[in-house]
Image (spheres, helix red, strand yellow):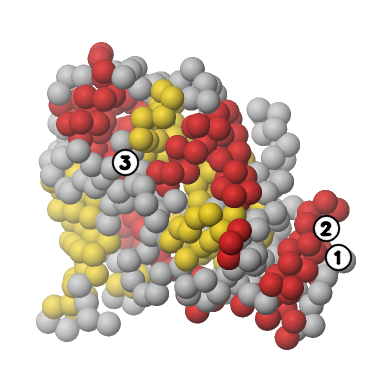
Amino acid sequence: MKLNEVQKAQVNNQIKRLREAGSFYGERLKELGIDRIDTQEDFENLPFSSKEDLRDAYPLGLLAVPEEEIVRIHSSSGTTGTPVIIPYTAKDVDDWATMFARCYEFAGITNKDRIQITPGYGLWTAGIGFQAGCEKLGAMSIPMGPGNTDKQLKMMVDLKSTVIGATSSYALLLAEEISKRGLKDKICLKKGVIGSERWGEKMRKRIKDELGIELYDIYGLTEIYGPGIGISCKYDTGMHIWDDFIYLEIVDPVTGKTLPDGEMGEIVITTLVKEGAPLIRFRTHDLSRIIPGECECGSKFPRIDIIMGRTDDMFKVKGVNMFPSQIEEVIRDTEGASSEYMADISHENGKDLFVLSVEGEDGADFEKVANKLRTTFKSRIGMTPVVKIVSLGTLPRSEKKTQRIHDYRVS
C-alpha cells in the first residue's frame, strides 16, 4: 500500500503545520531539514514518532494549533509512567465522530438501533467515541459506562438494546450473566462492536453463541483519535481502515523497514488531517498485516488483519520468548479447553515457575485437557508449564480489559 497523490499533499500540509507550530515533532523536522516529501521513499525516510516522544511532550507539547482552538483533551489508558495527553480541536472531534459513525454503518447499524455503550468515559477515549459516533449516526445511545451489571442487564432488557459496544472481557461477562439468569429470550441484541483488547477465537465464539449476535472488531488508539479508525465488515475478513483520515503502514519491528502487503509486522500510523496533535509515522506496537486485494463487500478501503498482539507483549520464561497470542493459539486448538486463562510467573528455588490456569468446558475430562495443553505447549513454544484446569467461571472476569499475564519475578 503506497501513498496516493492526495495523501502526499496531506502529509506535506501536516509537515508544514508542525514546523510552523514549533511542536516537538515540528522542531525535529526542522533539525533534520525536512520540509516536504515528493516520493514514497521520502515518506519512508521520515523519522518515526513514539509513545516516549509523546510522554516527553507532556502536558501540551503536542499542540499544533493555538490553545484557544482546543476543545477537549484525552489521555491514554496506561497506568504507569507519565501520561500521554492528546489535544483535540472541534474538527478533530467531528472527524472522529464521522469515522465512528462509518464504523457503525459498516456493521449494518442504523438510526433505528439502540446502542448500549459499556466502555469507560472520562479521559479514556472509548465511551465518548462510541457515543459520538452513535449520535452522528442518529441512533439511540444508552451511555451506561462499565460496571453495575445488574443495571446493565435491566436497561438491556427494558430498553430493548439492539447493539452493545464493549471490551471482549466485559462482553463475555455479560454473556455469562445473561445465560445464568435465563435472560436470553428477553434481550433484543443483534450486534456487538468489540474493541480495546485482543481476543482469541474461542472467546469470540463463546460471546457470539451465548448472545446469538454478530460481532465486529473495531480498531483505534487514543494517540490516533481513539476507537473508530477501522472496523470489520459482515464478511469478517479483516478490518477496513479509513485511509481518508489516516495512512497505515506495516514495518519490521526491529529494523523499521516498511514491509510488503501481506507480511506481519508493527502498525505505524500517520494522521492525514488531524489538527490538534498531528502525528507522523507513529509506532503503535500493535502487530498485524495489510491484507492484499479487495474485500467481498466491495469497499475500496484497505484492510488489516486482526491484532495479533503487541511488540511489547513479549515475555521470557526459562529462556524462551513468548507472546500471549501463542498461548491463546494453543488453547484454541485444545479440545475441552475454554477461552479463559491466566498465567502466573514466579521465580522459586533459582528457577522460573510458569503456572497456566485454564477453564475447562463443561463435561470435559480435565486431566486429559491438561495433558494435551502441556504437550502442545512444549511442542509449539518450547517449554512445559504447570497446567491447572478449573471449572467455567472460576477465573476473574473484568469490566474493562482482562489482565491475563501476571509476572511476580523481581526485575
Identify residue type, mark 2: Ala
Q: Does residue 14 appear left or right of residue 238 in this picture?
A: right
Looking at the rendered structure, the kind of residue marked 3 is Gly
Q: Quadrant of residue 30?
A: bottom right
Label 3 near label 1: C-beta < 8 Å? Answer: no
x and y, in percent, of residue 107 in the image: 53, 28
Disc 2, SS: helix
Q: Residue at x 31, y 57 (%)?
A: 377
- Residue 361 vs 187, above or below: the answer is below
Closer to viewer: mark 2 or mark 1: 2
Residue for point 44% across, 51% down: 125
Q: Which residue is mark 1?
A: 39
Mark 1 or mark 3: name the one nearer the start of the chain. Answer: 1
Q: Circle 1 — which element?
A: loop
Position in image of residue 380 (x %, y %): 38, 58
| Position of 286 relative to 153 (above/below) | below
